[in-house]
Image (spheres, grey):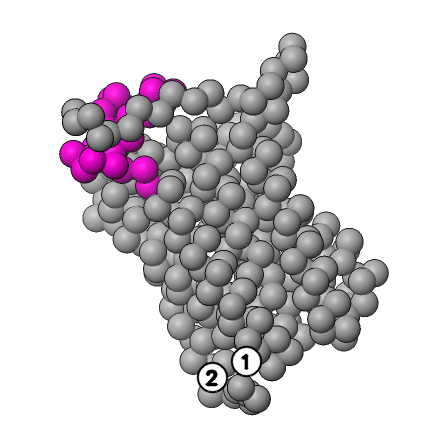
């Protein structure tokens, strides 16, 4: 180990009073929604959309992300346990505290949730909604991955790089310097947020429908595919696989993003 490597021994808990505790992950997760709400409210004001729809949209996003991420975790990573005890499986899947959230499931959940929202609020176009929600989703992803770092979870593989981190709070793997894969993803999400926000500020109501959505899925899950090579597998069944579950799931999502982006620029009408 070199002196340049980092020893990370921060507790994931901020405050604990008896059985009640506030954790960094939960705080950052909630902060993503709070700041995201303010950004979407500003967008609604710029584009003269009714503010009365904001609360329904926020509730849709919260339910879609939590349920999508939770169901996705079980469907993609623990589906083999369902037959053993279906009742306990469903209870643990839906009732907090949650032991696992899948970002791919959250993405699918948001797409479905916004489709339901659009059908109940006919004045919105589907891609108008997704283009604006991916801006705040990128920021939320930055908060969530930083929360994973505070939790010392989803750690990277061992490395001799000077920025390698020894996660003292993680007892699942050997205590050696590892890639801070959570920070790689958090910083990537933050950069994407800046890019999407800049593009929206440039185009506003003239944003080519689907363009920001396409960029989001290509960037997030394209980088996710490559970051997985630097991360420890999350489940034992992934050992020995040429590609892990995160990479397998990322491929169709990236292809979907490419399709949406190409379609958006074929049909674009811009006043730049």
Question: Is 180 colored magenta in this rendering?
Answer: yes
Mark 1 or 2, nearer chain start: 1
Residue range in magenta is: 157-181
The residue positioned farthest toward the right in the image shown: 52
Q: Is residue 221 above or below residue 27?
A: below
* Circles 1 and 2: CB atoms closer than 8 Å: yes
- 121 displayed left or right of 98: right
From the top left corner, tell me how far across and down residue 169 is, in percent: 38, 20
Give whichever of 204, 30 is nearer the camera: 204
Q: Is residue 247 above or below residue 92?
A: below
Mark 2: few/some/many CA within 10 Å (<14, 14-19, 20+): some
How far apart in space, not on screen, are marks 1 and 2 (Cα)?
Answer: 7 Å
Residue 215 picture location, percent across and down = 44, 68
- Which residue is pictured at 63% across the width and 40% down the height? 30
* Circle 1 Cα neighbour tier, 10 Å, few/some/many (<14 / 14–19 / ≥20): many
Q: Along the line of sight, which residue is nearer the eye, 23 or 83? A: 23
The residue under label 2 is 265
**Picture layout, residue 10 above or below residue 222:** above
The image's mark for residue 33 is none
Compared across the picture, whether 172 is left or right of 14 comes to left
Viewer-proximal residue among 196 and 157: 196
Residue 6 in percent (x, y) is at 29, 28
Residue 230: image quadrant is top left
Q: Secondary structure at mark 2?
A: helix
The residue where tag 1 is placed is 208
SS category of the residue bearing label 1: loop
Q: Nearer the viewer, residue 137 or 173?
A: 137
Residue 170 vs 30, above or below: the answer is above
């Amino acid at each position: 180990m070199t002196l340049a490597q980092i020893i990370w021994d921060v507790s994931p808990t901020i405050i604990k009073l008896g059985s009640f505790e506030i954790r960094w992950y939960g705080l950052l997760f909630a902060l993503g929604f709070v700041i995201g709400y303010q950004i979407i409210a500003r967008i609604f004001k710029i584009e003269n959309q009714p503010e009365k729809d904001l609360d329904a949209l926020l509730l849709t996003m919260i339910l879609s992300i939590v349920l999508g991420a939770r169901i996705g975790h079980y469907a993609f990573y623990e589906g083999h346990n369902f037959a053993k005890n279906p009742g306990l499986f469903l209870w643990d899947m839906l009732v907090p505290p949650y032991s696992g959230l899948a970002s791919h499931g959250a993405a699918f959940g948001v797409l479905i949730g916004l489709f339901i929202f659009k059908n109940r609020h006919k004045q919105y176009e589907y891609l108008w909604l997704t283009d604006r929600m991916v801006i705040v989703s990128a920021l939320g992803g930055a908060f969530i991955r930083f929360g994973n770092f505070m939790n010392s979870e989803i750690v990277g593989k061992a490395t001799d790089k000077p920025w390698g981190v020894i996660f003292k709070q993680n007892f699942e793997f050997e205590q050696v310097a590892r890639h801070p894969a959570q920070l790689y993803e958090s910083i990537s999400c933050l950069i994407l947020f800046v890019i999407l926000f800049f593009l929206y500020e440039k185009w506003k109501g003239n944003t080519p429908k689907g363009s920001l959505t396409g960029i989001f899925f290509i960037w997030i899950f394209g980088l996710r595919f490559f970051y997985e090579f630097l991360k420890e597998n999350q489940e034992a069944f992934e050992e020995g696989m040429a590609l892990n579950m995160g990479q397998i799931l990322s491929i169709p999502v990236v292809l979907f993003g490419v399709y949406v982006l190409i379609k958006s620029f074929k049909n674009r009408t811009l006043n730049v």
